Image (cartoon, rainbow, N blue to C red):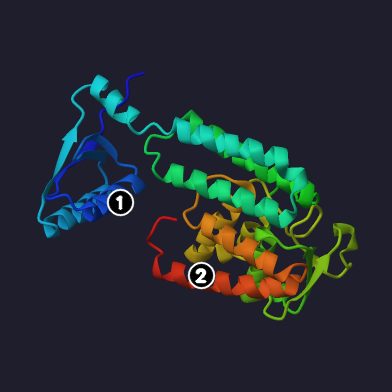
């Protein structure tokens, strides 16, 4: 099947003298954005707003350095040229390296503590997200590595969180906030991303006077407590929605675009799916907070509540941006 002919941007740049500083700045900026070098001083990217901003910044930088630069938009002339250009953006080798790192992680998993394991997996996730951010023509390799990443997360949870809930195939009933005020809420101890975010959501938007019980096992849940994020709990995974998203939908909170955006972040980190820009940073902060607080889930929730409050506030300033 022949590829469609794409619009492209070409940057032609010339810098004077032998000073390496402006050249190094140029190289780092273009490499980080995934630009392909056709020959010395000639770079290309798929046309788009971000590419135009990047190339404009490099034109300005070159001009300040006493050089010259031009941005030339063009379209492939035929399928052969299109294929050659796309080949310059092939990320298969980078994804293959990511798969090797995931395989090494899984082979070493039983020797690691939970904190070590989550840090290592977060590192691999960041590497792969960096590749995905400059994968302008995603294909089977990207899908394969995303599946492998989710599988690695499931393997980790099977070892350290064997009671991780399975998604039910059911509708999400609407609940009234007034029926859930001043309640005791219970979930599995050793909080991780979905549970800590769900506890934050409960206390901030559902039940400001919520009391939490951290359970050694789900069967320890008190009869009058509202269980969440374990099989058999009142609120847990439904289909592809994680507990945070189910809670938000149950109380009509998902109409808030900031909470919906947080839901996509939590969902991606918990069960995978479409990559989210803030995921790697949030996972790193979560791992650091977990390492800092150890077994103290109340202290962990306090730490991460500040982080989630900040994200919620930041999203209120950038609602129009893609996550």
Q: Quadrant of residue 40?
A: top left
- Indicate whether 58 appears above or below 227: above
Q: Secondary structure at mark 2?
A: helix
Labelled disc at residue 65:
none
Residue at x 70%, y 44% (from the top left corner)? 154
Q: Quadrant of residue 64?
A: bottom left
Q: Quadrant of residue 295?
A: bottom right
Residue bearing mark 1: 29
Q: Marks 2/1: CA distance? A: 30 Å
**Which is nearer the N-term, disc 2 or disc 1?**
1
Q: Is residue 155 left or right of residue 288?
A: right
Residue at x 19%, y 53% (from the top left corner)? 19
Residue bearing mark 2: 312
- Indicate whether 29 appears above or below 85: below
The answer to whether residue 205 is visible is no
The answer to whether residue 152 is visible is yes
Q: Nearer the viewer, residue 276 or 171?
A: 276
Residue at x 22%, y 49% (from the top left corner)? 55
């Amino acid at each position: 099947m022949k590829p469609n002919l794409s619009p492209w941007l070409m940057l032609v740049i010339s810098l004077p003298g032998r000073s390496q500083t402006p050249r190094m700045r140029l190289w780092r900026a273009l490499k980080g954005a995934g630009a392909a070098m056709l020959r010395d001083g000639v770079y290309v990217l798929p046309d788009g707003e971000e590419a135009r901003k990047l190339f404009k910044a490099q034109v300005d930088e070159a001009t300040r350095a006493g050089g010259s630069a031009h941005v030339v938009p063009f379209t492939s002339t035929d399928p052969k040229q299109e294929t050659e250009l796309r080949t310059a953006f092939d990320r298969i080798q980078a994804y293959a390296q990511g798969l090797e790192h995931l395989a090494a992680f899984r082979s070493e998993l039983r020797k690691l503590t939970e904190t070590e394991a989550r840090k290592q997996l977060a590192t691999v996730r960041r590497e792969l997200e960096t590749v995905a951010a400059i994968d302008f023509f995603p294909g089977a390799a990207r899908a394969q590595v995303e599946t492998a990443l989710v599988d690695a997360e499931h393997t980790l949870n099977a070892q350290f969180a064997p009671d991780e809930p399975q998604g039910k195939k059911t509708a999400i009933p609407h609940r009234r906030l007034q029926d859930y005020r001043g309640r005791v809420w219970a979930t599995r101890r050793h909080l991780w991303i979905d549970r800590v975010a769900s506890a934050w959501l409960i206390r901030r938007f559902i039940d400001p006077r919520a009391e939490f019980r951290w359970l050694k096992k789900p069967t320890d849940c008190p009869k009058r407590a509202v269980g969440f994020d374990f099989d058999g709990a009142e609120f847990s995974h439904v289909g592809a929605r994680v507990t945070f998203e189910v809670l938000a939908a149950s109380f009509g909170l998902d109409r808030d675009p900031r909470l919906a955006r947080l839901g996509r972040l939590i969902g991606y980190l918990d069960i995978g799916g479409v990559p989210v820009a803030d995921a790697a940073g949030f996972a790193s902060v979560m791992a650091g907070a977990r390492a800092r607080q150890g077994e103290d889930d109340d202290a962990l929730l306090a730490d991460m509540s500040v982080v989630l409050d900040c994200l919620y506030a930041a999203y209120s300033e950038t609602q129009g941006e893609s996550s």
